[in-house]
Image (cartoon, rainbow, N blue to C red):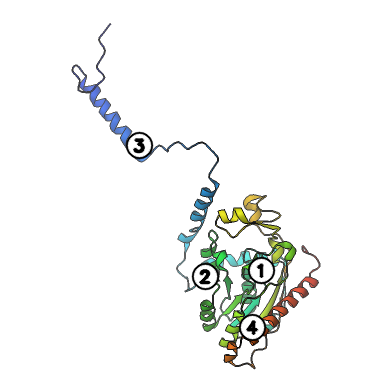
Amino acid sequence: MAEDTPLNPGAPGSDPELDELRDALDALRSQIRSRFPVPRERRAGPPDWEGLFRELRRRLSTLGMIERSGEVDEFGMDEVVLRRARPLLEFLAERYWRLEVDGLERLPEKGPCLVVANRSGLLPYDGLVLAQVIERARPLAERPRFFVADWLITLPFVQPYLARLGGVRACRENAERLLGAGRFVIAFPEGAKGATKVFRERYRIQRFGRGGVVRIALERRVPLIPVGIVGAEEAHPVLFKWNAPGRRLGLPFLPVTPTFPLLGPLGLLPLPAKWVMRIGEALPLDHLEPDAADDELLISRLTADLRERIQGLVDEGLSQRESIWG
């Protein structure tokens, strides 16, 4: 039997050609490992759903940002994105939700103007549709901007995309800048209290806070027009709020609707409820001086009057609508 070839390179009696082949194979293995690292074995156990959700939030937060057109104003509205979105918004308003609008003649031909509406539903379809309606009815004015609550901006990809469609963070400074630039501004004084109502409390107008919209309208001498929106609350009816899982995922709560989370991502699609929008007469403020904004009792009374007007417009819209779907 022939004597075996030594296995150690450089050992006495080793074959130089075999040593060179081993060196070449070792170099090839090193290159392969550096370019295609072998993933470490995953630990056995249940999947890390919270970690997956955090990673999804991170990735969605930059969704579409590489497509920015450069035609973006100081508040982030992108004319190119808006132009592409208009056909979808028109389809949703005219065909999907079969929107009926009353009172367009009560809107001024151009801004500045403060439009105040009831907040309906988790996602700001009401602001998007109302802005589309006003833009179509008043082509001489710049596209209205609608306010978005802070808690909604924290949702994945919502803030950058809503900003590109005309959404603006709700605060006094932004309202003053927009009105000072002569624009229509759409505000929802109910805030999160209106957006997070469960279905059994639908169309009950919540408290309007401290009267910020009335105070700004007085100080800026702009029309204050109430609007009642019916239909948006059935687009995403919240049956109940799942608080603990929502907080663990970084949300105020996890909404449970007839379709979500039962249908997964498909449950995020809005339902085809019938929409009715009623625009009321402007709140009479012309006879008041700007320093009336310092009268807290007057502000409280005017805020209550505004809330009652919007509740009345909502009630009229509900009576006008034959059914949720018709």
Secondary element under disc 4, as helix, strand or loop, is: strand
Q: Earlier in the sequence, mark 4 or mark 3?
A: 3
Instruction: Residue 83 in the image: state x and y as whole percent.
Output: 55, 68
Q: Residue furthest left?
A: 12
Mark 4 sits on what residue? 224
CB atoms at circles 4 and 1 under 8 Å apart? Answer: no
Instruction: Point out residue 8 in the picture as x, y percentages from the top left corner.
Output: 24, 21
Horizontal arrangement in the rendering, residue 33 relative to residue 282 (left or right): left
User: Which residue lies at the image location 51% right of the left edge and 80% below the top edge?
Assistant: 177
Amino acid type for the residue under numbered disc 1: Gly
Task: Name which of mark 2 and mark 4 comes first in the sequence.
Answer: 2
Residue 193 lies in what quarter of the image? Answer: bottom right
Residue 12 appears at what percent x and percent y? 18, 18
> Which of the 4 image quadrants contains residue 127?
bottom right
Instruction: Indicate the amino acid at tag 2.
Output: Glu
Mark 1 to mark 2: distance in Å? 30 Å
Mark 1 or mark 2: whose residue is earlier in sequence: 2
Give me the disc on residue 273: none
Residue 110, can we see it? Answer: no
User: Which quadrant would residue 112 be assigned to in this image?
Assistant: bottom right
Q: For mark 2, what is the residue?
A: 79
Q: Which residue is mark 1?
A: 194
Residue in the picture at 31% in, 33% down: 28
